[in-house]
Image (tube, helix red, strand yellow):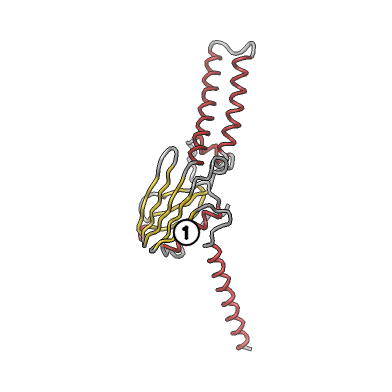
C-alpha cells in the first residue's frame, strides 16, 4: 500500500513539474501577432519595438480626441452663428469655456500622436540591460546591471489625480498597461505603455530569464 502511495506521489510530482515547465515555456513564447523584432546576439538579445500605429497605438485617445473636437466644433458653431447669443460678460465666459475645450482637444490629439509614434529597444548584453524609447514629445533611456534590478514586470500605469488627462483616462477606463523595471534604488522606469498585455508579460518574462532574475516580478492581469 505504501509503495503504491509513493508511486502516486512521485507521478503527481512529475506531472506538476511538467506542467510548470510547459507554463514557463509558454510564457517565453512570443504571442501571435506580435510585431516585436527579436535579434539574438552572442551574449544576449535585442528586442526592437516598432511604432504601434495611429489607431492602435493611440490607446483610444485618438478616437476620444476626435469626438471631443467634433463636439467642441458644434458648441463653437452654436455660439458664433446662433441669434441672441451671449453678450458682455457672458460672452467673455463663453469664449474662455470654448477655448478651454479646444485646448483639451488639441492636448488629446497631441498625446495620441505621441503614443502612436513611439519606438523602443531593449538590449540585454551579458548582465546589463539597456532600454531606449523615442517619442514625439520626449526620449527615455536607461541602463542597469543585473544586481541593480529588483523586479521586471507588466502593470497598469500610475495615474496622477491632479493631471486632467490622466484622471480623465482613468475615469473612462483607458488606463493602459506598461512594462515596469523596478531598480533596487531610485524610481520605477516605465515604457511600452499601451502595448498588448500578453505581449508585455512575454517581454517581462523574457528579460527576467535572460538576466536570471528568478522569482521576481508579478505581472498584472487585466
Of 168 and 49, the residue lying toward us: 49
Residue occupying the point 63% across, 86% down: 4
Picture layout, residue 141 above or below residue 42: above
Please tell me how many numbered marks the rendered image carries: 1
Residue in front for this viewpoint, 167 or 108: 108
Q: Position of residue 76 (x, y in %)?
A: 59, 20
Residue 2 percent location from the top left of the image:
61, 88
The residue carrying mark 1 is 217
Give coordinates of residue 51: x percent, y percent.
Answer: 50, 45
Q: Nearer the viewer, residue 206 or 179?
A: 206
Q: Which quarter of the picture shows residue 124?
A: bottom left
* Mark 1 neighbour class, 10 Å CA radius: few under 14, some 14 to 19, many 20 or more: many
Q: Is residue 6 above or below residue 81?
A: below
What residue appears at the point 49 percent right and 60 percent down from the top-left corner?
A: 205
The quarter holding residue 58 reads top right
**Residue in the image at 48% along x and 51% along y:** 179
Look at the image and tell me in which quarter the N terminus lies.
bottom right
x and y percentages locating residue 202 in the rendered image: 52, 58
In this picture, residue 4 sits left or right of residue 45: right
Nearest to the observer: residue 167 or residue 106: 106
**Secondary structure under badge 1?**
loop
- In the shown orientation, is residue 63 left or right of residue 143? right
Where is 188 relative to 75, above or below?
Answer: below
Amino acid at each position: 500500500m505504501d509503495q503504491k502511495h509513493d508511486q502516486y506521489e512521485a507521478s503527481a510530482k512529475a506531472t506538476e513539474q511538467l506542467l510548470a515547465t510547459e507554463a514557463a515555456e509558454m510564457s517565453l513564447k512570443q504571442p501571435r501577432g506580435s510585431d516585436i523584432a527579436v535579434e539574438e546576439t552572442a551574449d544576449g538579445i535585442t528586442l526592437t519595438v516598432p511604432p504601434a500605429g495611429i489607431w492602435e497605438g493611440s490607446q483610444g485617445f485618438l478616437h476620444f480626441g476626435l469626438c471631443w473636437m467634433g463636439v467642441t466644433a458644434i458648441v463653437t458653431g452654436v455660439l458664433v452663428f446662433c441669434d441672441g447669443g451671449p453678450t458682455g460678460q457672458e460672452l467673455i465666459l463663453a469664449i474662455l469655456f470654448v477655448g478651454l475645450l479646444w485646448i483639451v482637444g488639441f492636448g488629446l490629439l497631441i498625446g495620441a500622436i505621441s503614443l502612436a509614434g513611439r519606438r523602443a529597444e531593449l538590449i540585454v548584453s551579458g548582465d546589463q540591460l539597456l532600454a531606449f524609447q523615442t517619442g514625439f514629445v520626449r526620449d527615455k533611456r536607461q541602463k542597469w546591471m543585473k544586481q541593480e534590478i529588483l523586479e521586471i514586470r507588466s502593470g497598469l500605469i500610475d495615474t496622477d489625480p491632479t493631471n486632467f488627462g490622466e484622471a480623465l483616462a482613468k475615469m473612462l477606463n483607458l488606463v493602459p498597461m506598461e512594462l515596469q523595471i523596478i531598480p533596487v534604488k531610485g524610481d520605477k522606469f516605465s515604457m511600452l505603455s499601451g502595448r498588448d498585455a500578453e505581449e508585455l508579460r512575454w517581454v517581462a518574462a523574457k528579460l527576467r530569464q535572460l538576466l536570471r532574475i528568478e522569482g521576481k516580478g508579478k505581472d498584472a492581469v487585466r
